[in-house]
Image (spheres, rainbow, N blue to C red):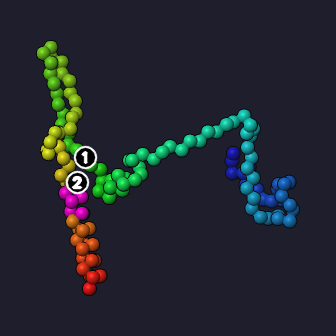
Amino acid sequence: MDFENTLSTAADTSDTPQAETGSPVIVMQSGDTAATSRSVSLDAPTLETAGLPAVVRSVFGDYHQRTQTVTETAADGTSVTSTEPVPGLAGLDWYWLSGVFLFTIVLWSFFRFLGVVFKR
């Protein structure tokens, strides 16, 4: 479908009354619609794109757990390399956690301040 065959005026169509000449009309030209079928299904939103996790991710960014590269060498000389998360407290993303903690303190302080102001 191209632009020249899609748009026309009311005078170009036989279905519309001639009293509306000059008004813009969109004429849709299509082929045989009986031979084609269309099925549309709506996917459920995932937690990555909707809800509270998406809001937290948009405000604070992604949480990146620290990883380490582990190379295991067998007795026959073959080695297997894998990427694994760092266990324990060393694997935490302390910059992200401290940002969330400081934001919480600032938000709490702001509402505490508003409570004192409106109380008086």
User: With 110 as the anchor, is 6 left or right in this view?
Assistant: right
In the picture shown, does residue 77 fall above or below 116?
above
In the picture shown, does residue 113 fall above or below 55?
below
- Where residue 55 appears, x then y in whole percent? 36, 56
- Where residue 62 appears, x then y in whole percent? 29, 50
Magenta segment: 98-104
Residue 100 in magenta stretch: yes
Residue that appears at 20% across and 43% down: 66
Q: Which residue is mark 1?
A: 64
Mark 1–mark 2 distance (CA, rounded to whole Å)? 8 Å
Farthest-out residue, top: 76
Residue that appears at 73% across and 43% down: 30
Neighbours of disc 2 within 10 Å: few (<14), some (14-19), many (20+): some
In the picture shown, does residue 84 fall above or below 55?
above
Farthest-out residue, bottom: 120
Q: Find numbered disc 2 in the image and state the secondary structure of the residue it sits on.
A: helix
Give residue 119's mark.
none
User: Nearest the camera: 110 or 1?
Assistant: 110
Of pointers 1 and 2, the one earlier in the residue sequence: 1
Task: Name the quadrant of the N terminus.
Answer: top right
Residue 103 in magenta stretch: yes
* Amino acid type, mark 2: Trp
User: Nearest the camera: 102 or 6?
Assistant: 102
The mark tally for this picture is 2
Q: Which residue is mark 2?
A: 96
Neighbours of disc 1 within 10 Å: few (<14), some (14-19), many (20+): few
- Where residue 73 appears, x then y in whole percent? 14, 21
Residue that appears at 48% across and 45% down: 44
